[in-house]
């Protein structure tokens, strides 16, 4: 995709467009886009006829919002040949769907060294996500990011490439899309990103949960039940989890110890987490099973860090 050379002209063009949301079903993997697709800010994501080559790329585009200029909407009906006939009665245009809370980029107050997680979009969709460090930014001008990853390798970028960045800012997760404006190698490999008009924010509360299918072992130290019992962690947060296990095993208020394995720094670590049974439900559980709502107790700092890192990474991948 070729970005506008003049950023001022690009912003003017965005203001002149009348954007309306596109149905999710109008864009399919492997099928040429029937019309140009923009994000909520009017930035071109796909040209008409361009193909999205993976579900992951389509999900990333959908997360930014899929919009069409009303001037292009006739293309969706299969062309404009022949007599158009009587004009259809005027009707209100659909309002854009909510896209979340927006903040100006400057309000995030990101410091040099902050880690940004990048997904590649458009023609580069499908490349692996990379984590790179912020070098600095100029309000209304540019965002400078190191092109060297944590392993010391230089990540290749192309000028004009479209990327989406996600970053933790306080208790929020911010996401914005930008074009790679300039790739530099001296005195240090880094890139200039187009300054984002706004950042989409999502609150990362301590109780934010991610869906999982993790095999765990639950144990309790009393005379009735010795050893460990298998279970399935169906969702997980930094403060608790939903455990699917055999019905009738535990009562409310029982203190358990949950053993599970989570990835940490490139390897898996086994955690042993104290938890209290807060709720029990059999609805929507498999036959003979129950869902136990568990609240974690006080965790060692290392275990809490691994747990929070796992939940955060899953939120990034969502």
Image (spheres, grey):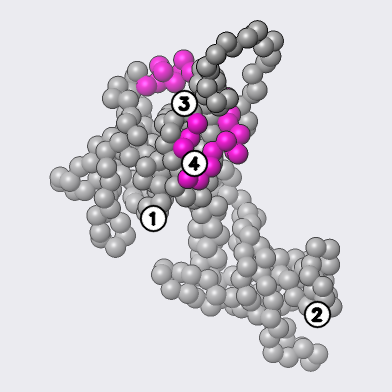
On the image, the x and y values in percent for residue 31 come to 49, 41
- The answer to whether 168 is drawn above or below residue 93 in the figure is below
Q: Earlier in the sequence, mark 1 or mark 3?
A: 3
On the image, the x and y values in percent for residue 5 come to 28, 25
Q: Which of 49/301 is in front?
A: 49
- The answer to whether 259 is drawn above or below residue 122 in the figure is below
Q: Which of 191/111 is in front?
A: 191
Quadrant where the image shows the N terminus: top left
Residue position marked by numbered label 1 in the rendering: 128
Q: Which of marks 4 and 1 is nearer the N terminus?
A: 4
The label on residue 208 is none
> Answer yes or no: do the residues labelled 3 and 4 have beta carbons within 8 Å?
no
- Dot 3 alpha-carbon crowd within 10 angstroms: few under 14, some 14 to 19, many 20 or more: many
* Residue 60 is at least partly visible in this image: no
On the image, the x and y values in percent for residue 296 come to 67, 68
Q: Which of marks 2 and 1 is nearer the N terminus?
A: 1
Q: Does the magenta stretch include residue 183?
A: no
Q: What stretch is highlighted in magenta?
A: 10-34
Q: Report whether 243 appears left or right of 7.
A: right
Q: Which of 180/51 is in front?
A: 51
Residue farthest along the top direction in this orientation: 86
- Dot 4 alpha-carbon crowd within 10 angstroms: few under 14, some 14 to 19, many 20 or more: few
Residue position marked by numbered label 4 in the rendering: 31
Element at label 2 = loop
Element at label 3 = loop
- The answer to whether 50 is drawn above or below residue 246 in the figure is above
Q: Does the magenta stretch include residue 23?
A: yes
Q: Which of marks 4 and 2 is nearer the N terminus?
A: 4
Residue position marked by numbered label 3 in the rendering: 42
């Amino acid at each position: 995709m070729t970005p506008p050379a003049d950023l001022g002209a690009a912003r003017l063009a965005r203001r002149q467009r009348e954007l309306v949301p596109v149905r999710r079903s109008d864009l399919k993997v492997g099928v040429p886009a029937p019309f140009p697709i923009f994000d909520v800010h009017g930035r071109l994501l796909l040209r008409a006829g361009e193909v999205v080559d993976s579900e992951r790329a389509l999900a990333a585009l959908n997360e930014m919002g899929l919009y069409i200029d009303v001037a292009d909407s006739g293309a969706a009906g299969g062309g404009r040949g022949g007599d158009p006939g009587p004009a259809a009665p005027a009707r209100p245009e659909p309002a854009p769907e909510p896209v979340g809370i927006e903040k100006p980029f400057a309000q995030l107050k990101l410091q040099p060294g902050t880690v940004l997680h990048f997904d590649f979009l458009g023609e580069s969709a499908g490349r692996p996500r990379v984590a790179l460090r912020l070098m600095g930014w100029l309000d209304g001008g540019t965002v400078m990011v190191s092109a060297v990853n944590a392993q010391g390798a230089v990540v290749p970028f192309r000028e004009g490439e479209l990327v989406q960045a996600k970053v933790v800012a306080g208790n929020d997760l911010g996401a914005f899309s930008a074009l790679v404006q300039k790739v530099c190698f001296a005195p240090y490999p880094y890139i200039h990103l187009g300054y984002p008009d706004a950042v989409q924010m999502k609150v990362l509360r301590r109780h934010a949960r991610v869906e999982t299918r993790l095999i765990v072992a639950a144990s309790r130290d009393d005379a009735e039940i010795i050893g460990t019992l298998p279970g399935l962690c169906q969702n997980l947060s930094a403060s608790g989890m939903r455990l699917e296990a055999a019905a009738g095993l535990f009562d409310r208020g029982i203190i358990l110890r949950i053993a599970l394995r989570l990835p940490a720094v490139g390897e898996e670590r086994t955690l042993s987490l104290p938890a209290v049974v807060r709720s029990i439900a059999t609805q929507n559980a498999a036959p003979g099973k129950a869902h136990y709502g568990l609240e974690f107790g006080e965790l060692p700092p290392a275990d809490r860090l691994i747990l929070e890192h796992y939940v955060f990474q899953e939120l990034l991948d969502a």
